[in-house]
Image (cartoon, rainbow, N blue to C red):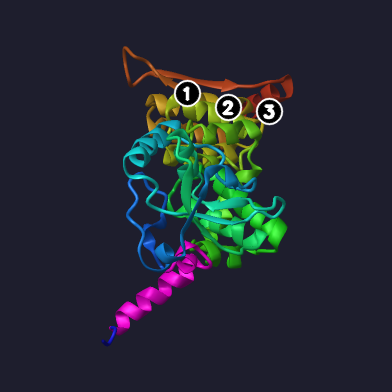
């Protein structure tokens, strides 16, 4: 049978994208994603699978995934009790313990099998290097979207630090663009408090990247949560802060940001920025509730020299 050229091209592209991933190791079986209702084994993977006692398996200390959803595992436990473990767990001979195996991919299935009180689980045993083990574990979790952004970034950093990857080769290995890898790695520069907020889901990776260049990302992260800002709003506010500079316009834009989010007229905010840039001081423009055409313009100064400067500008130097 002749295989269409387009199909061959698609298959080659998939292989390159996955690098040395699960499809290459397990006979191109796309069902090896760690899903709640796995499909039965077939092909090469089925022929090479064997069962071993659950206590012969050990978790991988370099597993990029640090958080496991107990509710999701409980759902998998019910499936395993009814049908057993339908996908094998990918393992390698344990590098330090004889007659033991280290899990490369499928730790969630292993955890669920223990909760289901299974005595044995199916495994596929492969001779893998430390580098292969980390790569495959990272690829599996990334393609199932089971990692937090920080877990993914830390996995990339580990492959670069310990195994000599550069961003281009790493992107090829995990099937991502170089810019994606670079953006994820940037998150590691955030303060620990902000990283925790991303891990907990309080803010997104997009928020984290938006506030990276700010002088006080922790303050902005708190404001994002308090005001419920989306990523686009956050990016705009960071740009405003850069324009004003550190310590200018009343010590930063937090108060103006709060007003902007609260719904202040964007034309008024733009006028405030323009006058502030001219004077180098914080400017507040407030309309009267009784008469929208009237209001007040307030110039804020922090020392007498600033007051002298603004008076000189207002009076043409003839006060």
Type of secondary structure dominating the magenta stretch: helix
Report the span colored magenta: 4-27
Q: Position of residue 100 (x, y in %)?
A: 63, 50
Work out which quarter of the rendered image holds the N terminus and state it: bottom left
Which mark identifies residue 309? 3
Real-space Cα separation, disc 2 to disc 1, in angstroms: 24 Å
Q: Is residue 10 above or below residue 216?
A: below
Residue 90 lies, in percent from the top left, at 51, 56
Q: Which element carries disc 3, helix, strand or loop?
A: helix
Tell me if residue 113 comes above or below residue 200 in the rendering: below
Report, in whole angstroms, how far the alpha carbon at label 2 lies from the one at label 3: 13 Å
* Residue tagged 1: 226
Q: Which mark's residue is nearer the viewer, 2 or 3?
A: 2
Question: Earlier along the polypeptide chain: callout 1 or callout 3?
Answer: 1
The quadrant of the image that shows the C terminus is top right
Snapshot quadrant of residue 301: top right
Q: Nearer the viewer, residue 47 or 264?
A: 47
Q: Residue at x 71, y 56 (%)?
A: 161
Dot 2 falls on a residue whose secondary structure is: strand
Query: Which residue is depicted at the point 54% across and 31% down?
Result: 197
């Amino acid at each position: 049978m002749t295989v269409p050229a387009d199909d061959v091209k698609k298959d080659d592209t998939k292989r390159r994208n996955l690098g040395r991933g699960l499809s290459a190791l397990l006979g191109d079986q796309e069902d090896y994603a760690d899903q709640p209702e796995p499909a039965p084994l077939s092909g090469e993977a089925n022929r090479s699978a064997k069962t071993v006692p659950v206590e012969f398996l050990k978790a991988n200390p370099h597993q990029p995934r640090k958080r496991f959803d107990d509710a999701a595992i409980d759902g998998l436990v019910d499936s395993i009790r009814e049908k057993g473990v339908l996908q094998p767990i990918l393992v390698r001979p344990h590098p330090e313990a004889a007659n033991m195996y280290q899990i490369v991919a499928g730790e969630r299935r292993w955890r669920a099998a223990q909760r289901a009180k299974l005595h044995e689980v199916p495994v596929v045993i492969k001779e893998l290097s430390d580098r292969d083990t980390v790569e495959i574990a990272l690829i599996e979790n990334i393609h199932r979207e089971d990692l937090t952004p920080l877990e993914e970034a830390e996995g990339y950093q580990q492959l670069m630090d310990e195994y000599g990857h550069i961003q281009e080769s790493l992107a090829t290995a995990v099937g991502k663009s170089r810019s994606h890898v670079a953006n994820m790695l940037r998150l590691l520069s955030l303060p620990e408090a902000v990283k925790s907020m991303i891990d907990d889901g309080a803010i997104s990776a997009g928020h984290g990247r938006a506030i990276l260049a700010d002088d006080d990302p922790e303050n902005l992260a708190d404001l994002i949560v308090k005001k419920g800002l989306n990523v686009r709003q956050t990016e705009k506010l960071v740009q405003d802060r850069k324009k004003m500079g550190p310590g200018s316009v009343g010590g930063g834009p937090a108060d103006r940001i709060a007003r902007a989010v609260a719904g202040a007229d964007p034309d008024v905010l733009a006028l405030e920025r323009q006058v502030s840039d001219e004077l180098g001081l914080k400017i507040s423009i407030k309309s009267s509730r009784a008469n929208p055409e009237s209001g007040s313009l307030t110039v804020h100064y922090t020392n007498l020299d600033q007051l002298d400067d603004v008076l000189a500008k207002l009076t043409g130097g003839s006060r």
